Image (cartoon, rainbow, N blue to C red):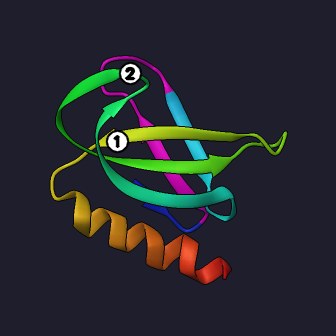
């Protein structure tokens, strides 16, 4: 889910939740693998900085990745430049 402050991911099979602040998002792009594992559905990967100024990545399996990438870029990446 995209919200005013960033991106929220909640795993539908567990209680895992990630809330990525919009100002920490550095890049959004299309991917077919994440952390060495092949994804069987198209995904959007998001690079973001953590509180320790370290870079991290999260991947979301979504339909129509180019549309989501464009939305994320407009909402968070281009706004911060």
- Identify which residue is drawn at 56% across, 71% down: 76
> Considering depth in this image, is 73 or 5 the residue closer to the camera?
73
Q: Residue furthest top?
A: 14
Q: Quadrant of the C terminus?
A: bottom right
Badge 2: residue crowd in 10 Å (few <14, some 14–19, many ≥20)? few
Q: Which mark is residue 60?
A: 1
Q: Quadrant of residue 67?
A: bottom left
Q: How many numbered dots are placed on residues in this image? A: 2
Residue 4 x %, y % = 55, 68
Q: Which residues are magenta?
A: 5-16
Q: Is residue 4 left or right of residue 42?
A: right
Above or below, 71 against 28 in this view is below
Eye-nearest disc, 1 or 2: 2
Please provide percent x and percent y for residue 47.
55, 49
Q: Which residue is mark 2?
A: 36
Pointer 1: residues within 10 angstroms few (<14), some, or many (20+)?
Answer: some
Q: Is residue 51 magenta?
A: no
What kind of element bears circle 1? strand
Q: Secondary structure at mark 2?
A: loop
Identified at 48% across, 23% down, the residue is 16
12 or 33: nearer the eye? 33
């Amino acid at each position: 889910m995209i919200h005013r402050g960033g991106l929220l991911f909640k795993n539908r099979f567990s209680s895992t939740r990630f809330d990525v602040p919009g100002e920490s998002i550095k890049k959004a792009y299309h991917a077919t693998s994440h952390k060495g594992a092949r994804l069987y559905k198209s995904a959007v990967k998001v690079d973001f900085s953590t509180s320790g100024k370290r870079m991290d990545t999260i991947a979301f399996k979504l339909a129509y990745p180019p549309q989501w990438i464009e939305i994320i870029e407009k909402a968070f990446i281009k706004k911060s430049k």
